[in-house]
Image: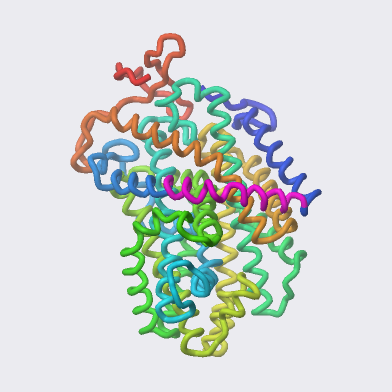
Amino acid sequence: MMKVATSGIFKGMNKKMSIISIILILISISLTGYFPTKSSNVLKNVREILNPFLEWYYVLLVAFLLALMIWLGMGRYKNIRLGGDLEQPEFTFFTWVSMLFAAGTGVGILFWSVAQPIMQFQNNPFTGVQMTPEAATMAMSLSFFHWGLNGWAIFSFIAITMAYFSYRHNYPLTIRSALYPIFGSKMDGILGDIIDILAVFATVFGIATTLGLGVEQMNSGLKEVIGLNISLSLQLFVTIVIMIIATISVVSGVSKGVKLLSQGNFWLSIVALLFLLFFGPTQYLIGMTLESTGNYIQNIIKLTFLTNVTHNSDWQSTWTVFFWGWWIAWSPFVGMFIARISRGRTFGEFVAGVLLTPTLITIIWIGLFGGTAFYEELFMNQNIIEAVNNDISSAVFIMFQNLDVGIFAEIMSFLMIILIATYLITSANAGTLVITTILSSGSTTPPSLHRIIWGIILTLLTVVLIIAGGLEILQSAVIAAALPFSIVMISMISGLLKSLSLEETPARSGNEKQNVREPWILDEDTGEEATIIDELNPNVKKIEKLPEYR
């Protein structure tokens, strides 16, 4: 049984886990802050050492997760509900999708939606002659690949696993819950603490990386719109302001602050897309998006299993390894947040919503933003390539300026600054909520004090990573932080499959009754099932006999 403190500053939190997590992160902050150059060099060296291994390891893991999620959404378990058999979803479909998308990749695709297609346009191992219309289609497809089904398979696996054990078997909403079928009551001790601390560590660095990228982009936008120079002091100021707003928002809870911000983000994003569709090269954008989508679908299996074994280039490590590491590092945070808002949905509904819908939105977003940039480069003689090479974070704003729509370009650039800020706030407050949920042993309402404490810690880490070296150090940090948690993910796969095998008769429809096993732990002495009482649901009944699976 995981216990939380009943008094003192750690009231409502797992005291031991909280202290260890805070100490580890503060040590990282101190070392990076006091020795920025050495820290940067160490992380770069670690990344270079790991790359040959990660080029096939991440590929294999992500490929398996994609296949697993498709099977869960379409196979014999598709009608299992994340909760009671007749339970209905807490949020409407629109609110649900807007929340998971905003917390999932909102900041990332804002940063990369123009820069990545243009960078792939200049150099990728799949196009013979670079910077041609044909190369543009391939570059767009590669961008879809890194932001599409494979990445969302990572998020959706973590989310569906946590939601399944929490809402169907009454376990706490923590990472360790998925490992009870394998390790039993050992998960209540130090082993479970290690698992959840690894999740916290990966989450913190994943959020800090995204905040760092978003702050750099906001600085570039402020330069383009109101003439403020790009400076470290301005980036630090923006980081602090964003985190203050995020912390205030997260204290208000998911149903208020996070929900409203996510819906606002979604509507602002729609405005940006409609602007490009009507004021940009409409016919070209529709055609480019459709053609690139077809190319992506045709090549997805090839790209999914691609390693660097036959290519003498650093493309795989620069792009695929970084993105899969980033998705994995973000997966405890985004996965738990999606789980938190997905109660009541069936496996089939969940997979359709979390795997397919965000991928479709991403394709439209990158198709319109990246497609506009390609049109400017290929047919308007606007040298957006040079702008991207000079400053990746300025790409979106340069693209709007090149459209020659007068004052509307300034308005849209200002809108993008607001959108970046709101996406950053949404990601930060959702991340803070997730960290404190893990450290409070799965409570859906962790203490406000600790949400504030972790908001401050995230701010400090983001600041020192920005000081230490910008984009490259952020990428190296997230890749290093993701690797330990990827091992936990493999164990979670085993725990989920073992638990699903105990589901006696999956329902044929969402309204049909089915037998559901109650939560269990293994008695350390006999190996038999024992009763578990969950603090979130003290009315759990004594479980029935389960087949032996030690």
- In percent of width and height, residue 220 lies at 65, 73
**Magenta range:** 38-61
Picture quarter with the C terminus = top left
Instruction: From the top left corner, tell me how far across and down residue 483 is, in percent.
Output: 55, 43
- Residue 67 lies, with reference to residue 447, above or below; the image says below
Q: Position of residue 546 (x, y in %)?
A: 30, 19
| Image position of 93 (left or right of 109) | left
Q: Who's the residue at 47% across and 48% down the image?
A: 56
Residue 90 part of the magenta-drawn span: no
Where is residue 277, by image quadrant?
A: bottom left
- Does the magenta-highlighted stretch encompass residue 45? yes
Answer above or below: position of 115 versus 160. below
- Looking at the image, residue 409 lies above or below residue 174: below
Main SS of the magenta segment? Answer: helix
Residue 228 sits in quarter:
bottom right
State the image coordinates of residue 496 (x, y, percent, origin top left): 37, 34
In screen coordinates, is 547 left or right of 253?
left
Residue 13 is at least partly visible in this image = yes
Q: Nearer the viewer, residue 158 or 488?
A: 488
In percent of the image, x 43 and y 68: which residue is there?
A: 126
Report the residue at 67% width, 50% height from top: 45
Q: Which residue lies furthest to the right in this view?
A: 34
Left or right of 339? Residue 199 is right
